[in-house]
Image (cartoon, helix red, strand yellow):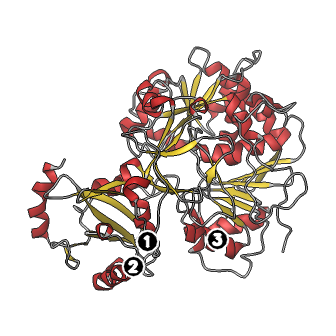
Amino acid sequence: MPEKSTPSDGSEPQAGSSFEVKDPFGGPAAAGAPKTVADVVRRRAGDPNVGLRFEGRSWTWAEVHDEMERRAHLLAHLASAEPMHVGVLLDNGPEYLFLLGGAALAGVTLVGGNATRRGEELERDFVHTECAAVIASPDHALLLDGLDVGRAAGNVLVEGSDELARAIHDAPRRPAHEPAPDDLYLLVFTSGSTAAPKAVKMTHRRAAAAAVQMWFGTHDVLYCVMPMFHSNALVSTVLPAIGTGATLVMRPRFAASSFMADVREHGVTFFSTVGRALSYVLAQPPHPDDPDNRLGIVLAPESAAEDAAAFGERFGCFVISGYGSSENAVIMTPSAELPEGALGVPMEGMDVAIVDPETLAVCPPARLDDNGRMLNADEAIGELVGRNTLDRFEGYWNNTEAEEARSRNGWYWTGDLAYRDEQGVFWFAGRTNDWLRVDGENFAAAPVERLLRRWGPITDVVVVGVPDETTADDQVLAVLEATDPKAFDPVAFDAFLEAQADLAPKWRPRWVRVLDVLPLSPTNKVDRSRLRGEGWDVTDAIWWRPDRRGRLVALTDDDRERLRPALSRRG
């Protein structure tokens, strides 16, 4: 087996040790630490080591740096007036990397567009962020046809085109605008799962710190398949590669079928992902060469605990979770010694609490009975809040209302539900809109999902609340993912539920929908907002309990017609 990755100090990463992440806001900068991303990029000037591999081609870091300098002149020319913002609508690839470095050197703010958005939504993103130009791939440029992109109107440049090549060549060489640490470097859109996406500000200070925060060295190979408009790809992989001189391997997008072949071919030592990616790789047929790789640590927040354990066992690496967000205000430190599925414990120096949003009181720890059932969910689950971390939040572009919602009472409110066990370990309980109220009792979706995943015939499950047709409360809809949805056996599922000693009565799904694949976002997270919006009024098969204490039966067309008026009354 090839040697696994080692930290830059030569020591081996050990099981049970924490993933070493330096806090970008945790104290005075070390001597010689970069203050801006421009400082980080200049470190790669003249570096002969391989910096980038992409689809059979490779560039040294010196060559990457030279391309970044050329893009700096282009970007400074395109964004010559305030605000100096340029949008990108690109898949992962060399051009995106060159523009990231060019923006740093030019003191221009890069705005990462999400090509899965369409029409007015995409138009709004570039107008809202006041982009002076947009650089797009040929396919994505077609998405902008007919849209009013504000300042960027008539200034959309297409990747690979003669027009872009001429613009790069002809851009006037001007003295670089040296950015300051607190200057805006990136605008990164949130997912928009609960409202219109917000453009999160990332300054040079934060991005430069992210570039040197991990233990990577020049021997490391970092694999990037997460979209580069997402903060996970930028902070965990792309910026650290630039900062440490590690080799960056890129793919335009995630592909489970070629994933481990790439890992072996390029000697990948680290990758990061969120959501369902691990499960898709695990679904590929086992191969005798599975353990034959250089993977050391995989960072996989929001992956199922079962998938993380299976991936680590099959491919011989550490898979760790943790918690963070684009806003960077609350971070949970992952560790291999924590229980499977836990968020972790707060980064040193962070005062993080579970708070009742109504009373601002700190929620007590969760109490479990002998069967593992939470006895005090009503009082133990609350919102995850950083009480001394608000200064880490750099704000949203032109969105004071959203900023105020995040900063109530001088604290940072994550919008995530969680609970804390008696050992001080934090556990995820869903988003704030994943809170259900059934027959007057509040509970979160995540603990119910963890229980339902025990059922062998399914590969995943999402729990959402749907309106009760007779009260103002919710009822539980379990959306199951199964290889063969037509084989779903409601009698067997009910028997499974009856056998779960830790299934609270009000957790029992009244509605069941079975899909072959759960809908996903561009970052492989389950699209809960879509499932919540669709509810039970869909064309595929649905089972329900007309008598709430009774057995599951198929929902008929007559049932739908009878129930729709009640659904309309609930909005």
Q: Residue at x 60, y 29 (%)?
A: 391
Residue 35 location, x and y as percent?
A: 77, 27
Residue type, mark 2 in image: Gln
Label 2: which residue? Answer: 500
For the image, the number of numbered tags is 3
Of tags 1 and 3, the one toward the viewer is 1
Which one is nearer the viewer's eye here, 175 or 513? 513
Label 1: which residue? Answer: 451
Of tags 3 and 2, the one toward the viewer is 2
- Under circle 2, the secondary element is loop
- Under circle 1, the secondary element is helix
Residue type, mark 1 in image: Leu
Residue 68 as seen in the image, left or right of residue 44:
left
User: Can you say whether 440 is above or below 196 in the image?
Assistant: below
Q: Earlier in the sequence, mark 1 or mark 2?
A: 1
Question: Cβ–Cβ below 8 Å for labels 1 and 3?
Answer: no
Q: Residue at x 64, y 71 (%)?
A: 311
Marks 1/3: CA–CA distance: 21 Å
- Under circle 3, the secondary element is helix
Q: Residue at x 78, y 74 (%)?
A: 292
The circle drawn on residue 438 is none
Which one is nearer the viewer's eye here, 99 or 209? 209
